[in-house]
Image: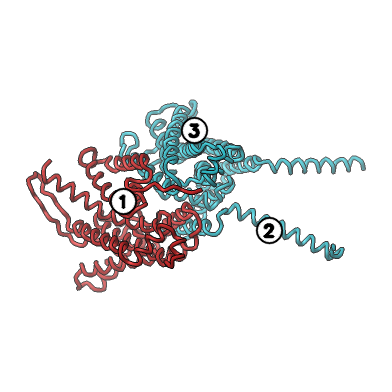
Amino acid sequence: MLQEKYNVKKQNKILQNFKKFSKHPLFGIFIGAFLMVMLQVLGKTGLVQPSVVDSLANIWIFMIVGLGFTLLLGYAGLASLGTAGFIGIGSYVIAFFLGKLGLPFFLVFLFGILIALVVGTIVGFISLRIEGMYLAIITLGLSEILVEFFKFATKITNGLEGFQLERFEILGHLMLEHEIYYIIVFILILTMIGVVNLVSSPTGRAMLSIKNSTSAAQAMGISILKYRLMTFVLSTVLAVVGGMLYMMYMRSTEPGIWNIGLSLNILVAIVIGGAKSIWGVGLGTFFIFAFDDIVLKNIPFFIKYGNATYIINGVLIILVVMFYPGGIVKLFNDIIRYIKTTAKNIKTSWKEHKYGKDD
Amino acid sequence: MTLQFFLTIIFQGLAGAAFLALVTMAIVLIFKTSFTTNFAQGSIATFSAFAVTSIFTKFFLVKFPDINPLLMLLISIFIGIIIGFVIGLFIDIFIIRKSRYSNAITKQMITMGIILVISGLLPVIYGIIPLATPRPLTTKVFQINVGGDIPLYISGHSLISIVIAIIVLSILFVALKYTKWGLGVRATASNETVASMMGVNTKFITAMSWGIASGIGALASALYAPTIYTLTPDLMFSLQINGFLAAILGGFATFGGPIAAAIIIPFARVLAWQFLSNTWANAIVYVLVLLLILIKPVGLFGKKTTKKV
């Protein structure tokens, strides 16, 4: 009898501990990581098709980029259209230094981040001079310069043909595709943890305050120089890292990929998902990049007209921006809140019915 | 430097400036009334250019093979301009007007969404790309030789485009200065709320500006497409980026400044092409323009506006 009671108590305690644990911001990330790894394991056994795993890897890569972009758009309020160009830089860094020159992997990776730091600092300084809506145009111009570079600096970038990357070695070990998948997942998890910590730190709050009012933030003693530069550098680094991972996994690059369409798709993904939450970024990228690949590409209409999926993306961003600025994440939260309030209402009305009204 | 070389530069610069000035004018017109930069400008224009070519080749050439093709082409271009005008009106009335109190970046995102919608619609409406080659107004090529090894070839189409651009821009400038609509645009540009208080129908003015801007874009694309011989979904993309940069470089404050910048940029490109490098001309011009904008963010002809908190 006593033993039973003790067992129930223990179970309750475990449940409570689990509840406490599940409220922790990193809990969801670890669940996500587990799922990502499981998908690859299932892919090895053949339960999940390899093409699906490939497009999943694609999504994780763009999620890394998207997480950087959300810092820029959701937290610093800066719309940039240069993302595709920055991802392109990453892909060409791997292609040239690892593929063509055959330098060791870690050196190349560090070098890519170094380039990202430099580019991000330059763009950040530009963003200090040029406000708000002009920034999108300027970054678009920068992206064009980068594409011109990819096209015409034939000695480095191989021109319009682009690069095909051979299998490469890390620390003397020839990398297989699924191992690179694990690297991608690892970096994605690191990024997610980093972003979650960053946005709930004083830095994140400073960024938000700058977004809401530059003058007010300045008056409170927040250095716009410091935080804007930081946001730009972080988002550029993440974009370049995304590009490097893209090149490692997809193993081919050409100037045509890094066009404005990609930048727009990343922007749409972030806005649709919800620019202020990492889950929003995940949902948005999943919707834009996976929905196209896995679902829509099987419908005859979209097979016939390849670009027609853009219509859905475009209509969605217009609708979300106009009527539902919170994005899909807010939709989920709203539904949960609605269910909770209706459940509460039903409970109280049931109690009123049973015990009479409380005057 | 010979006279021949001088003439070459002048002609090439003007040919580029004609299209760029039209595009820049359209961008500035929308900026003045809606306070946002319309990223979909190029897409709307591309849509109209596709319409012009497909109406001309699939309808007129098939149904009326006997009539003078130039006349039919002009009619097609006119229809294309009307299509652009209607799309512009539609976008303003149903989308931009509804979000008029949101901030500029939100409106920008809406126009970026419109880009995606239009580029998705292109293959659905016009069939699988590429479409037929767009037809120039005239295939005549003039040959001028004033003391050079190679004679200077001037395509009749570019010459007509330059003339049309000058006429259209002059009409617009006169309209902005002397018509009721122009006065309304200037009033809306300086302060929308006060303008509507003073009895200016700002909704009508804005809608008309969107329509006219998209119509100008359609004209520019219909004239531009034959010069590059192909119709692609990103037909107007580089023109549009140049248009934006010209508008910032000139300063959005006036109408004249951006047009001046739109004339400077093609000349800079031609000079860079001739004297510096064939392949890097575009990149050099972009870098120069960006540097200029960094040095003078309000633009070459802009005025500094103080913002109240």
The colour scheme used to paint the residues is by chain
Which residue carries the number 1 mark? B257
Nearer the observer, B161 or B194: B194
Q: Locate the N terminus of chain A and report the quarter of the image it occupies.
A: top right
Does residue B225 sit above or below A182 in this rendering? below
Q: Nearer the viewer, mark 3 or mark 2?
A: 2
Q: Residue A94, how many percent across, how many down?
A: 42, 34
Which residue carries the number 2 mark? A338
Q: Residues within 10 Å of mark 2 (few under 14, many from 20)?
A: few
Separation of residues labelled 3 and 1 (CA atoms): 56 Å
- Specify the label residue A175 is tagged with: 3
- Specify the label residue B121 is tagged with: none
Does residue A309 sit above or below A244 in this rendering? below
> Which chain is in cyan here?
A
Q: Residues within 10 Å of mark 3 (few under 14, many from 20)?
A: some
Q: Residue placed at 52% from the left, 53% from the top? A: A291
Report the chain holding disc 3.
Answer: A
Residue A178 left/right relative to A1: left
| Colour that chain B carries in the picture | red
